[in-house]
Image: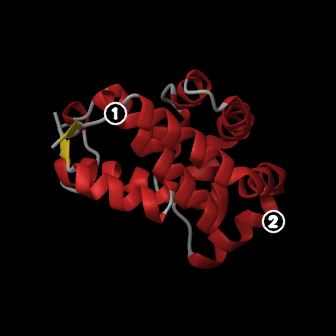
Amino acid sequence: MIEVTDVALRQAAGEGMDTFIGVFTDAYKKEIGGEMTAGTMPLLTGEQHSLLAYQIFRDEVMEGGFCQLIQNGYGGYIFDNPFAKVMRLWGVGDLSKLIYAAKKIYDSHRDDLERERTDEEFMAMYEQYEAFDELEDEFLEKEEEYTALVAGYVDEHLELFAKIV
């Protein structure tokens, strides 16, 4: 089991929920050598993958929206795995609904959303895929709430996410 220190968790909790989650996800990224491949995927448990998926989802959507998330290669990791279902099971139902709504758009336009693009073509995606705008706005409005709920779930089930040393 991946280990994190109690000291790091206590310090991070004082800095914010996203920092608390980051203690875990940084350890996961270190374990998989910074990249997800067929060879590194089995190194993490389902719960660890779900937490890493949340951190990736949060960071990508906050920085550049769903178009950036997908163009950076995370579409399949988020939408083809039970991430939305897990968020519901962790008590973050509104986020689960938002992910399912984004998945409908993703599934309908997957080939185009994932194709290689120039920087100019990438910027044009934001106009072409305005359907994501409302979902991005909703996420940005509720991100702190979602992150607090995810961090709360992790805090209540630490043994599922890492060995605390």
Is residue 126 shown above or below 29?
A: below
Name the residue located 62 percent from the left edge and 63 percent from the top edge: 62
Number of labels in the image equals 2
Quadrant including the C terminus: top left
Q: Position of residue 88 (x, y in %)?
A: 62, 25
Q: What kind of colouring is applied to the model shown?
A: secondary structure
Using a 10 Å C-alpha cutoff, classify the residue at mark 2 as few (fewer than 14 neighbours), some (14 to 19) or many (20 or more): few
Please state if 12 lies on the left or on the right of 117 as rendered.
left
Label 1 secondary element: helix
| The label number, if any, that marks residue 25 in the structure image | none
Name the residue located 62 percent from the left edge and 27 percent from the top edge: 91
Q: Position of residue 122 (x, y in %)?
A: 63, 69
Please state if 116 lies on the left or on the right of 136 as rendered.
left
Please state if 112 lies on the left or on the right of 12 as rendered.
right
Location of mark 1 (residue): 158
Q: Quadrant of residue 136?
A: bottom right
Q: Callout 2, which amino acid?
A: Glu
Query: Nearest the camera: 138 or 110?
Result: 138
Location of mark 2 (residue): 127
Mark 2 → mark 1, Cα distance in angstroms: 42 Å
Query: Nearest the camera: 32 or 144?
Result: 144
Which one is in front in this view, the residue at disc 2 or the one at disc 1?
1
Please state if 120 lies on the left or on the right of 150 as rendered.
right
Q: Earlier in the sequence, mark 2 or mark 1?
A: 2
Name the residue located 62 percent from the left edge and 42 percent from the top edge: 110
Q: Quadrant of residue 53?
A: top left
Is residue 29 shown above or below 162?
A: below
Using a 10 Å C-alpha cutoff, classify the residue at mark 1 as few (fewer than 14 neighbours), some (14 to 19) or many (20 or more): few
Quadrant including the N terminus: top left
Query: Nearest the camera: 153 or 133?
Result: 153
Q: Position of residue 52 (x, y in %)?
A: 40, 44
